[in-house]
């Protein structure tokens, strides 16, 4: 299970460093590079809840193994892609696999370890693999890109994926819980079409023109499908998204904070490697090293966030975390072109501290704010909100960046200017999240006993 989550998360972390090389090799525009990241995020976000349902219906080991096999196939497609279109398709396929692997792995651990202490320890180790991916991805990935080319980051993960697949079949007991579960195919289809249309319009707007028919159609499609989705989910038995959960103010606030958290964070992770390599002349490996203050600060603080939330209250910790992320993004945006690296590292560290403070409490608050029968659904919705925020962050901040640098950024001054214009928008999202946390997360939100439905 740990190998599975490491594969899914490492893939997402490493590709950021390869974007400049991919753009040069495959003649991909900025919007094309945004799709390389967001194809994965979109597939992951829109299928995550269905992935958990499939595991309950047809067996969690079976779905975990199927997801791993899809990741292997998607990784092969990415590693051999002759053009950006095939690469984007491979990334989408990998996102589908991750949407099956992540919820299945969590459920497998929950049912395998029946002792509460053992289960807590196992889930803690599983969760730490997310931080491990954040730490080793930029360093190992950057070294591979410099020494063996960008395709190596995909192809060299295949042996690990094959081991994961084999171990799943050999070592994992099968489990399922189909009672009361069913697939919501209409809701799933509407979610994929609506999110895809919104991402298309946001990513391609600066490329096609914001007033062109396809872009307007994309925004209108999302605006029309959103209320249709809500109406269908209200009437569906076993809906993809139980609308009753949105009666709870704290739960809704936690979802909003989760989405805004990744909005600025993933937008920054998309832009900073391009800035390091195009504006400051760093290699992929050096760019990965230069990103390390962010991940190291996150790892150092995230282990303390639960303790701090209990002592100080989740509302204060979440608001402080989001505010720090906003401040860190503003620090990066305000730096002059010749800023010393120490100043950049300070901004990245502030963002990492804020992310570390917020990540654990936002999940805990969401789960504690609903009834225990809905805790699994609440957790899935938080992760979905995170990935939707990531998708939109890359789309929106990337579009602003491209508006000032063009679709083929090469001029150092233009790249720096584009970064300075995009990052404050990400900061505004984080600061809005801080206000929402301060105003709508209830006192004692971690005490559990959410409202009964």
Image (cartoon, rainbow, N blue to C red):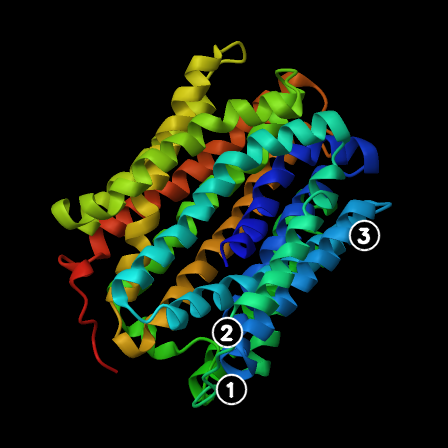
Mark 2 or mark 1: which comes first in sequence?
A: 2
* Res 13 quadrant in image: top right
Q: Please state, as top left, top right, bottom left or bottom right, where the C terminus lies in the image.
A: bottom left
- Check disc 1: other Cα within 10 Å, few if <14, some if 14-19, many if 20+: some
Asked whether residue 311 appears in the rendered view, the answer is yes
**Is the Cβ of the residue at disc 3 closer than 8 Å to that at disc 1?**
no
- The image shows residue 144 at horizontal and vertical percentages of 69, 31
- The image shows residue 219 at horizontal and vertical percentages of 60, 60
Mark 3 or mark 1: which comes first in sequence?
A: 3
Distance between the Cα atoms at labels 3 and 2?
36 Å
- Check disc 3: other Cα within 10 Å, few if <14, some if 14-19, many if 20+: some
Say left or right for 144 vs 46: right
Reading the image, the residue beneath label 1 is 182
- The image shows residue 24 at horizontal and vertical percentages of 79, 31
Choose between 176 and 310: the one closer to the eye: 176
Say left or right for 90 vs 437: right
Residue at 51% x, 49% y: name it: 390
Distance between the Cα atoms at labels 2 and 1?
22 Å
Reading the image, the residue beneath label 2 is 173
Which type of secondary structure does the marked residue at label 2 adopt? loop
């Amino acid at each position: 299970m740990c190998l599975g989550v490491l594969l899914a998360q490492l893939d997402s972390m490493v590709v950021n460093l390869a974007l400049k090389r991919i753009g040069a090799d495959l003649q991909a525009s900025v919007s094309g590079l945004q799709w390389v990241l967001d194809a994965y995020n979109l597939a992951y976000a829109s299928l995550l809840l269905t992935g958990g349902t499939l595991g309950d219906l047809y067996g969690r080991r079976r779905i975990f193994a199927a997801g791993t096999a899809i990741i292997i196939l998607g990784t092969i497609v990415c590693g051999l892609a002759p053009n950006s279109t095939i690469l984007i398709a491979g990334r989408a396929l990998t996102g589908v696999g991750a949407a099956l692997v992540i919820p299945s792995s969590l459920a497998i651990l929950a049912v395998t370890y029946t002792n509460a202490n053992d289960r807590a320890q196992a889930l803690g180790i599983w969760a730490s693999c997310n931080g491990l991916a954040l730490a080793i991805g930029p360093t190992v990935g950057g070294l591979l890109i410099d020494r063996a080319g960008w395709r190596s980051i995909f192809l060299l993960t295949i042996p690990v994926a094959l081991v994961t697949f084999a171990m799943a079949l050999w070592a994992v007991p099968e489990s399922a819980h189909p009672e009361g579960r069913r697939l919501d195919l209409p809701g799933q289809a509407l979610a994929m079409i609506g999110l895809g249309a919104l991402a298309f319009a946001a990513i391609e707007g600066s490329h096609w023109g914001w007033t062109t028919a396809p872009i307007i159609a994309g925004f209108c499609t999302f605006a029309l499908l959103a209320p249709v989705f809500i109406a269908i989910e209200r009437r569906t038995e076993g809906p993809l998204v139980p609308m009753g959960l949105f009666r709870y103010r704290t739960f809704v606030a936690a979802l909003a904070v989760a989405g805004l958290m990744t909005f600025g964070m993933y937008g920054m992770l998309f832009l900073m490697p391009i800035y390091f390599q195009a504006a400051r002349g760093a290699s992929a490996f050096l760019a990965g090293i230069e990103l390390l203050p962010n991940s190291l600060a996150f790892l150092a603080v995230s282990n303390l966030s639960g303790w701090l939330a209990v002592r100080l209250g989740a509302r204060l910790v979440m608001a402080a975390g989001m505010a720090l992320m906003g401040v860190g993004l503003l620090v990066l945006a305000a730096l002059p072109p010749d800023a010393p690296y120490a100043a950049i590292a300070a901004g990245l560290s502030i963002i990492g501290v804020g992310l570390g403070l917020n990540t654990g409490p936002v999940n805990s608050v969401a789960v504690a704010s609903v009834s225990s029968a809905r805790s699994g659904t609440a957790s899935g919705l938080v992760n979905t909100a995170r990935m939707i925020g990531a998708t939109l962050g890359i789309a929106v901040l990337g579009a602003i960046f491209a508006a000032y640098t063009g679709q083929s950024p090469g001029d150092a001054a233009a790249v720096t200017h584009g970064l300075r214009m995009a990052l404050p928008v990400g900061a505004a999202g984080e600061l809005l999240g801080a206000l929402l946390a301060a105003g709508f997360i209830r006192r004692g939100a971690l005490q559990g006993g959410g409202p009964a439905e």
